[in-house]
Amino acid sequence: MVSHASKDARPDDGPTLIEIEQLLASPAVTRQLAEAIGHLAVTVQYRVEPDGAAWWWSSRGDSTATGVGSAEHPDVVVTCDGRTARRLLSGDLDVSRAFLLGQLRVEGDLGSVLPQVSGERRTRRTAVDAQVPKDG
């Protein structure tokens, strides 16, 4: 997988706007979003705290769109810290696993995006999916 991480970035830093733009411009990402969300009409906003970086993706009918910044009237807002955002964007962590581990806060109509979240699984590395932290 190609990394868009800055040489100076620390693991806990959120992604830079340049990193987000590079990723969203990738034809592979556009194709994966289109495959994952199918016929859904949904807008998902991702927000990184505390630095405030944000990006979004949207599907309406047969078209998908992505962008940096805030989306108007998102159906769902997903908030996470910088480290989680970096791992999501690099493919080291899948959205459903991050949610189950409590690394994401979700506001809005979660039911509208559940089919797409499960579709993202095929874009992530199998080794990461197999790792589940154990308590104790």
Image: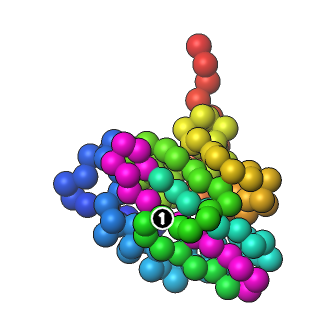
- Which one is nearer the viewer's eye here, 99 or 66? 66
Q: Position of residue 47 (x, y in %)?
A: 47, 53
Residue farthest to the front, as pictured: 73
Q: Amino acid at mark 1?
A: Ser
Is residue 79 at all visible to an observer of this figure?
A: yes
Q: Position of residue 102 (x, y in %)?
A: 60, 34
Q: Residue at x 71, y 79 (%)?
A: 60
Determine if the magenta segment contains residue 74. Answer: no
Residue 79 relative to residue 33: left or right = left
By secondary structure, the bulk of the magenta-drawn segment is best described as strand
Q: Position of residue 132 (x, y in %)?
A: 62, 34
**What residue is shown with label 1?**
70
Q: Residue at x 39, y 73 (%)?
A: 21
Q: Quadrant of residue 37?
A: bottom right
Residue 54 relative to residue 114: left or right = left
In the picture, which quadrant includes the C terminus? top right
- Which one is nearer the viewer's eye here, 136 or 6? 6
Element class at badge 1: loop
- Residue interval drawn in magenta: 48-62
Q: How dense is the environment of label 1, judged by Cα within 10 Å: few (below 14), some, or many (20 and up)?
A: some
Q: Residue at x 55, y 38 (%)?
A: 103
Q: Quadrant of residue 121?
A: bottom right
Residue 15 relative to residue 64: left or right = left
Residue farthest to the bottom, as pictured: 62
